[in-house]
Image: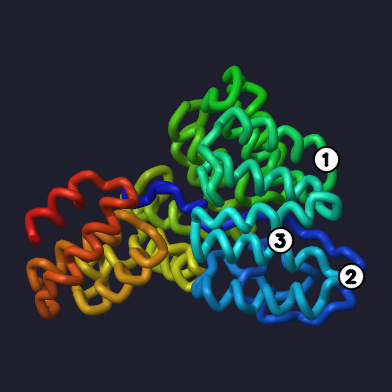
Amino acid sequence: MRAGRLGLVLGLFMGVLATPAAAQSVPETDCDRQAGLWLMPRAEGMAQAYAIADPGAAVAACETAVADYPQEPFFAVLLARAMVAAQPDDARALAVLDDTSQHFPALFAGQLAQLYEQGLAGLPTSDRLAGELFFAACEHAPDPFARPGCAGLAVMMIEGRGGPADEIRGFAMLENLCNGDWPMACTDLALQRELYGGASEPEIAGFLALACEGGDLLGCSLLGFRHEVELGVPHDMARARALYQRACDGGEVHGCANLGEVFRSGLGVAPDVAQAVQLFDRACRGNDPYACATLGSILADGRGVPMDVVRAIEVYDRACWLGDPEACDWADSLR
């Protein structure tokens, strides 16, 4: 689905606000600006990055920060994030992340859980280990660093992954986290209610509105899609475009893909294939399979832009690698 989550965790560690004493004495660095954890800057008011736009530059910046400020262990968290964004199977990130386990145990456990859940940094995919680590992270509540782990645990409980299913407890945890000012949990709550029921379409849209207002850009993109298709909220393409733009500007690539579709299809605006191609290209580089496949179709046919079969094959191959089986066939048909 164009508006789905679509495995966006790749390279994108999450966390929460905390301000260690060391963070307050170390100035903002390029590492913060390029790899700072979203909604959890190293210190209040410092930079944060929803997604890492240039992983190689982020790795270099964070290596410099680690060397220049050895008293600030949080830079190791950011370096590990950048390393996985640059090379998803880079096992060296584990040793870097391990250096943070004593300083930020809840954050360490939660991020290691995400690596096992996604099979990143050379680790095997393991719902069992991911669930155990999410539980370990959540055990540190009310430490604010525990909130991502609690949210991950709640989703696994609802879906019955890594252990027995417990929808009642899982939904209760997400509701508490959403009400407790963790916007990512509001998005998770909306997605899980959409899958498992128990909430009306307007209620689901309300969860996404809370997520977006709190800073979860995926929530903004998903809410925009609902305005586009009139699902739980009024049809409002101007509002949808604004939400897509907000998400895309912040680095949420599905928002870029949705905005690309607006310009490709002329949804409330004059069709602009050149603008659509730019947006699909940005989203494809951020690992959105729909954007890659759609970009491939445009380039292969030369619709509104010069035909480029070589580039079309490249982006079809990327969509194939990201899990779109039809894109695999389309790439082969062009070779």
> Residue at the location (75% across, 73% down)?
66
Residue 77 disc label = 3
Viewer-side residue, 68 vs 183: 68
- Side of 196 relative to 188 (left or right): left
User: Where is residue 324 drawn, in percent x and y?
Assistant: 26, 47
- The image shows residue 68, relative to residue 267, as above or below, that is below
Q: Which residue is mark 1?
A: 140
- Foreground of the two, 228 or 246: 246
- Under circle 3, the secondary element is helix
Disc 3 and disc 1: Cα gap in Å? 18 Å
Amino acid beneath label 1: His
Which structural element holds mark 2?
helix
Identify the mark nearer the N-term, 3 or 1.
Answer: 3
Q: What amino acid is labelled 3 in the image?
A: Val
Query: How much space separates mark 1 and mark 2, taking CA atoms?
Result: 21 Å
Q: Amino acid at mark 2?
A: Ala
Disc 2: which residue: 22
Mark 3 and mark 2 lie on one chain; the one further toward the N terminus is 2
Picture coordinates of residue 133, whole percent (x, y): 69, 36
Contact between marks 3 and 2 (CB within 8 A): the answer is: no
Q: How many marks?
A: 3
- Residue at position x 81%, y 52% from top? 104
In this picture, residue 118 sits left or right of residue 47 = left
Task: Locate residue 47 relative to residue 210 in the image: left or right.
Answer: right
Pointer 1 or 2: first along the chain: 2
Residue 85 vs 32, above or below: the answer is: above
Q: Is residue 322 above or below residue 260?
A: above
